[in-house]
Image: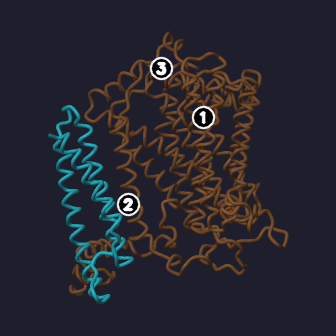
Chain colours: A brown, B cyan
Amino acid sequence: MDNTTDGPSSEGEENGRSGITGRVLGWFDSRLGLSHQLLRPAPQYSINPFYWLGALATVAFVIQGVTGGIMMLYYIPSPTQAYATTQYIFQTVSYGTFLETIHLYTAYAMIMLAFMHLMRGYFVSVHKKPREVMWVTGMVMGFVTLGFGFTGYLLPWTIVSKSATDVGIGMMGALPQPVASFLTFLVVGSGSDAGELLRFYDLHVFVLPAVLLVLLVVKMYMLEVHGVSAPTSGDESLTPKKKKLIPIFPDVSFYLVELAALFGSAVILISVIFPLSLPPEYSPALAGQYVAQPDWYFLWIYQILKISALEEAGLAVALTVVTLVFVALVFLPFIDRGKTREINRRFVYTTLGAIFVGEVAVLAVWGYLTPGIAIPNETAALVLGGTALLVTLVSVVAYRVVFGSLGLLTKSGGHRKIPEASTQPSATPRAVPAKSAVLWTSCVFVVLVAAGAFFIGNSVSGVVALRLGSQGAVQSLLLSLGGLTLTVVSTLYFVYRLDLGTGAIKRRVRAFEVGWRE
Amino acid sequence: MIGEVSSPAKEAVAVERMSVRIVALLLIIAAVSVFMLWSVNPVGGGSETTFALFLAVDLVSVAMVSYVERAVSREGRLSRAPLIAGCCFILFLVVAGVYLFT
């Protein structure tokens, strides 16, 4: 072998790199074949955090695996020792509180990232052909992620975790019989506390991680087959530089390292600012004095179950409705069979998605603010209906202002087909290109909708509390109304600013001042 | 853009040199932060916070090294904004960490 070809400098040159980092990378590359395109290259436009939300959720999963693995060295899954060993981790183990806090907050981040990944995928229609199975796999991974939250919540055996888990297990009994029996057997077993805790522990540290890893491999395989989805507006709106394919190593890998490192540092900072504290240990005597409340990601479901009409006899109806929502999301690719992917031509589905996000946010915040308080039917109808109406109105206004129409039909009377492949140019003409300004506008509208829904819900809650003679209701109501006013004013200002380009609103405002002269 | 020079070739060399200096500095910061976080007395008051802050410094440094390598090798240029933001963030974390450490 000619030794001159094995030197570091020549490796760097072979890989088109120079300098210290180039030579180091070249050394590894020549030994490990990292740049041999084992994985499909990604287009340049995928260098965007929104394309890698699932990858970030996976990073959160890995961090949980590491921190959870360390905690397993100390934790004993027994009702008599679970709390004591958790307390030992908090108080005695070096950096134990930090470990527990990181584990919990990455779990929260994983759930939030999975939800963002889901809704981003929904709004940009990644579920369309040929990614239907990928979507269903992702949904199942989402359920497994929620399962992690549900099973892990019980393990510290605190009054908070045990009471909330009991509520969840109680809800399973209202499901149709074969499902209820199976789920109850799966998580509770014989019904003893020891059996329940052990099953939750097994599910949390063995079954669910194994299932998630298998699903992750399946989804990665499908990503490798189909590649990342093209922008909804098609490829032709992109510059050649944006369309250029870049290798997974080093370009995309380095980008993911950046994202993962920044995500890790953000979680660490949040953990430092808001360290976790351990609630009191569970005991049947204490449980009677405590208002059971699930963790934030289940609060929206819990709030639905607190609606008067859906309590007790109506519980099965409520659970059926929630189950149907999940079923609809799982089978979305087979329900939403239209071929268009452009947001400006998917008014109905975009609005339905926005209503879903709005309702979930309102219900979660409402549930957090009203622990253990039953919701009167008329209040529930007012808040949920009001939120849906507000979101629909904002959606209509947004479509009219941003896209010029609701885009329900094309000129030819049907939906226009957008190419699926990421690298194929479109043969059909484009109508309204979705630019970054449009995306920003949409984001601002979503924020305004969320704020509006929150303040409407809070105002209604304040009115109800005022009628019940609750202390501090006036202050809460005034704050909510102030926030609502601010949101409405912000929305009006935003719409006014948006319209400055065409000047229609400005002309109307001026007409009030000086009269029409045109 | 960093390294305003006349010809594209000279500019590329200048950016490469600049990136090597930045990466070297970041690696030193990362090494010092690793040394500091392992030097923290785990039973001392506020040790968890100090440990976490130096760990965050390490991660941000890694993110910046990754950014510099990616930007230089792919685009041949470095943007100021991410570097300045990262440096400010590291400075904040180091000051907070040293304050707690001492």
Q: Quadrant of residue A372?
A: top right
Residue type beneath disc 2? Glu
Tell me: B16 left or right of A486: left
Q: Are marks 2 and 3 in contact (CB under 8 Å)?
A: no
Q: Looking at the picture, tell me which residue is in the foreground, A144 or A335.
A: A335
Q: Earlier in the sequence, mark 2 or mark 3?
A: 3
Q: Are marks 1 and 2 in contact (CB under 8 Å)?
A: no
Residue type beneath disc 1? Leu
Q: Quadrant of residue A400?
A: bottom right
Q: Which residue is mark 1?
A: A481
Q: Residue A352 location in percent, x, y? A: 72, 50
Q: Which residue is mark 3?
A: A159
Q: Looking at the picture, tell me which residue is in the foreground, A32 or A232.
A: A232
Do marks 2 and 3 share a subunit? yes
Name the front one of labels 2 and 3: 2
Measure the alpha-carbon separation of dots 1 and 2: 42 Å
Q: Earlier in the sequence, mark 3 or mark 1?
A: 3
Q: Which residue is mark 2?
A: A258
How many marks do you count on the picture? 3
For disc 2, the chain is A
